[in-house]
Amino acid sequence: MAIKKLAMFKGKSHPKTWLISIARNLVINRYRKNKVWDRIKHFLAPEKPASNQIEEQTLKNLANSQLYDAILKLAPPFKEVIILRGILEFSPKETSSILNCSPNKVNVMFHRSLKKLQVLLEKEGFTHERYSNYSG
């Protein structure tokens, strides 16, 4: 994505800042796209969802919202690694080239970011079976 937009880079900021803003905007766009899809998919579905499906979807939306809010509360380096590795699913090598560090540092930062995120979510009362089994 950044290579396609390289001609638009004005040089007013550090290239790392520019790349992070691209990554941030991609995350926001993906989140918006998913939100729009959640709003319109019931029009495309021939049958109405059962009440427990509505409950499950509401709980899932609430959990996702809490997760995004918690990510936004992390310090910038941890937030960047979580967004690039966890949300955008970049490899350690791709992330290291964006953040200008080694892949090993990316892996360590990602692990530490997940720990910090887990602590933050637990403080806020967030419980999810996928994260409650995390022992890292």
Image (cartoon, rainbow, N blue to C red):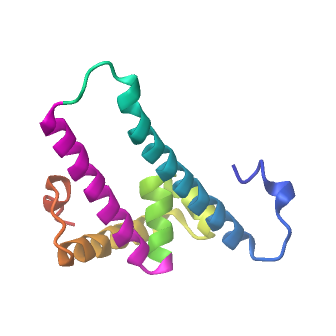
Asked if residue 90 is positioned above or below residue 20 in the image, the reply reads: above
Image-based side of 126 in relation to 26, left or right: left
Viewer-nearest residue: 47 or 100: 47
Q: Is residue 51 inside the magenta stretch?
A: yes
Asked if residue 58 is positioned above or below residue 83 in the image, the reply reads: above
Asked if residue 49 is positioned above or below residue 5 in the image, the reply reads: above
Percent from the top left, x then y, of residue 40?
43, 35
Percent from the top left, x then y, of residue 82?
43, 64
Q: Is residue 41 inside the magenta stretch?
A: no
Q: Residue at x 34, y 73 (%)?
A: 112
How many numbered callouts? 0
- Residue 34: quarter of image: top left
- Residue 24: quarter of image: bottom right
Q: Which residue is drawn at 14% across and 54% down?
A: 129
Can I make out residue 93 in this image?
no
Q: Main secondary structure of the magenta part?
A: helix
Asked if residue 114 is positioned above or below residue 77 in the image, the reply reads: above
Give the position of the C terminus as an image quadrant. bottom left
Magenta span covers which residues? Answer: 50-76
Percent from the top left, x then y, of residue 99?
60, 68
Residue situated furthest bottom in the rendering: 75
Image-based side of 8 in relation to 77, left or right: right
Percent from the top left, x then y, of residue 23?
59, 59
Q: Which residue is drawn at 28% across and 72% down?
A: 115
Can I make out residue 83 in this image?
yes
Image-based side of 134 in relation to 113, left or right: left
Viewer-nearest residue: 6 or 47: 47
Image-based side of 75 in relation to 45, left or right: right
Viewer-nearest residue: 50 or 28: 50
